[in-house]
Image: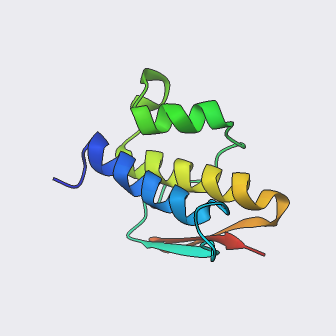
Amino acid sequence: DDDTDESLFAAITAVEVKLLPGLCSTPLQELVLDGAPSDWHPPKPLINTELDRVKQGAETLGAFPNSHRLCNALSSLFTTRFGSLANHKIGQNRICFGIL
């Protein structure tokens, strides 16, 4: 089952590792999520403690479906890594996380 908290944590961690400059010599600069939830919008900037809650499935963010939690985490990861250069392009059932 790909809609479990464990799968969500694994996906977020895999992207996080690709964005860490100390662990990856060629950091991920763009990620396209096909089949993204059509009602998702970029959140206000998330702080790292909130990203940890997304990973852990904490009650404050647990009310969201995992698809929204994944998108929120990806948004936070790209914003944390690239700051004001982070960009989201939302299309029909597709979200592109990247840099300007």
On the rendered structure, is 44 left or right of 63?
right
95 above or below 62? below
On the rendered structure, is 38 left or right of 51?
left
Residue 63 visible in this rendered orientation of the protein: no
47 above or below 21? above
Residue 90 image offset from top left, x and y in percent:
59, 69
**Quarter occupied by residue 5:** top left
**Residue drawn 63% across the image and 74% down it:** 25
Residue sitting nearer the eye, 91 or 27 = 27
Residue 49 visible in this rendered orientation of the protein: yes
Q: Residue furthest top?
A: 59
Residue 47 image offset from top left, x and y in percent:
69, 36
57 above or below 12? above
83 above or below 100? above
Residue 12 image offset from top left, x and y in percent:
45, 53
> How many numbered discs?
0
**Residue drawn 71% across the image and 42% down it:** 44
Residue sitting nearer the eye, 59 or 49 = 49
**Residue drawn 48% across the image and 37% down it:** 54
Colouring scheme, one of rainbow, by chain, secondary structure, one colour: rainbow
**Quarter occupied by residue 46:** top right
**Quarter occupied by residue 30:** bottom right
Q: Residue furthest left?
A: 1
Residue 23 image offset from top left, x and y in percent:
58, 62
**Residue drawn 50% across the image and 31% down it:** 53
On the rendered structure, is 28 left or right of 80?
left
